[in-house]
Amino acid sequence: MKGKITEKLFKLRANQTNVRTEFIAGLTVFMTMLYVLIVVPGMLEEAGMPKGPVTVSVILMTGVITIIMGLYSNRPFALAPGLGSVAFLAITLTVAEGIPWQVGMGMVFISGVLFVLFTVLGLRQLIVKLMPPAIKLSIGAGVGLFIALIGFRNAGLVVASEDANALQLGDIGSPNAILALIGFLIMSVLLARNVRGHLLIGIVIVTIIGIPMGVTTVPDKIFSLPESVAPIAFELDIIGALKIAYFPLILAFFIPDFFSSLGTMLGVGSKGNMLDKNGNLPNIDKPFSVDAGGTVLGSLFSVPVMTTYVESAAGVEAGGRTGLTSVTTGFLFLLTLFITPVIMIIPTEATAPALILVGLTMLSAVRNIDFSDVTESLPAFMTIVITIFTFNFGNGIAAGIIIFVLLKLLSGRHKELHWGLYILLIPLVLYFISLTN
């Protein structure tokens, strides 16, 4: 009976997968996303929010919304608070501008309502169809390099240099970097030998190796009780966020997360051969509805913009093809409410090599870009490099579209442009202008 229900919900046979593969994929995504439980509450604490309740709220929203994504859209996408939005709220709005975090959450709520309206009115789906094929093809590569950069950073293999204002080689002789390199070698060999579950196996092995190296910390207890979210629940200030002066700030939430979520869905979808011949994701309105509603719901519990995570690609690499992957990931996150000490022993050095390898496997899409036509190849190139240089692929996609339209227009090939692209250009230009102020 259980098998029939699972098959009916997720259509495993039609997607050429099975329960075991989907579970391994979901577990892989969960492990690669665990850093969220450390990074997000840590940043929001800087905004004056209590860390314990915030951690519980992040776990709840990540688990619940990811489960809803799996059940409703039947796609292997996992959601969590977008790091860009978290940093923007905690650092830019609260610390730098002195805006209370409650008002910032009000802005997140308004941004979420805009997401919902765009989804209900079909505007998000229209924008996907308007996007040039070259941009869609470049998104997968951009997401891949973005994931790889996160992996290199988490491994300590590259660090930001304040003096040089650039990335530089990290301390590769440190135990952390050595452990990450060991993990990279193990996972690479397993991948070369076509071992199923190579990422998950590698993460477990590296976590164990990290114990005698002093990188993996063994907890002194197994179970823990979650704190109450009462201090932060329903504390958002929507009225305070409605000031005209805050419109550019709301736009700064909306535009990058709009395209980041879109980019992740198309990039991960491409990795799993889920896109149609035009580079579109069938029934994309369903995952759009979930992330839009998730942002509104998250804001009520003081969690910034919920977005589809690039680490979902690790699940697809592990064979995940349906919403059962997402449901597995979501339930595992909810379990951390009670066994956080055990789950948190997995060091970022164990998951970093997995992200680097996933990045490698996502680069193949660029081979279908027409590099003989500069009006096609240059926007695609700029989408990729701006994604990496600004550490935000929402910026990369937005810039790529602007460059595509301008090149076609100024080179006398305006007939190749859909009229809707001219309208789309307006908010994108306004977004970049707002960043300069």
Image (cartoon, rainbow, N blue to C red):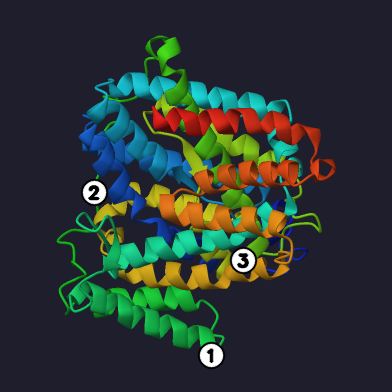
Residue at image coords 76%, 49% = 282
For residue 1, say whether it is visible: no
The percent coordinates of residue 219 (x first, y second) are 18, 62
* Rendered position, 288 above or below 229: below
Residue type, numbered disc 1: Arg
Which label sits on residue 19?
A: 3
Dot 1 falls on a residue whose secondary structure is: loop
* Rendered position, 202 above or below 412: below
Residue type, numbered disc 2: Ser
| Label 3 packing within 10 angstroms: few (<14), some (14-19), many (20+) | some
* Rendering quarter of residue 126: top right
Q: CA distance from mark 2 to mark 3?
A: 30 Å
Residue at image coords 19%, 71% = 215
| Label 1 packing within 10 angstroms: few (<14), some (14-19), many (20+) | few
Dot 3 falls on a residue whose secondary structure is: helix
Which label sits on residue 193?
A: 1
Instruction: State yes or no: discs 3 and 1 in contact (Cβ < 8 Å).
Output: no
The percent coordinates of residue 255 (x first, y second) are 53, 34
Label 2 sits on residue:
224
* Dot placed on the residue nearer the N-terminal end, 2 or 1: 1
* Rendered position, 10 above or below 398: below
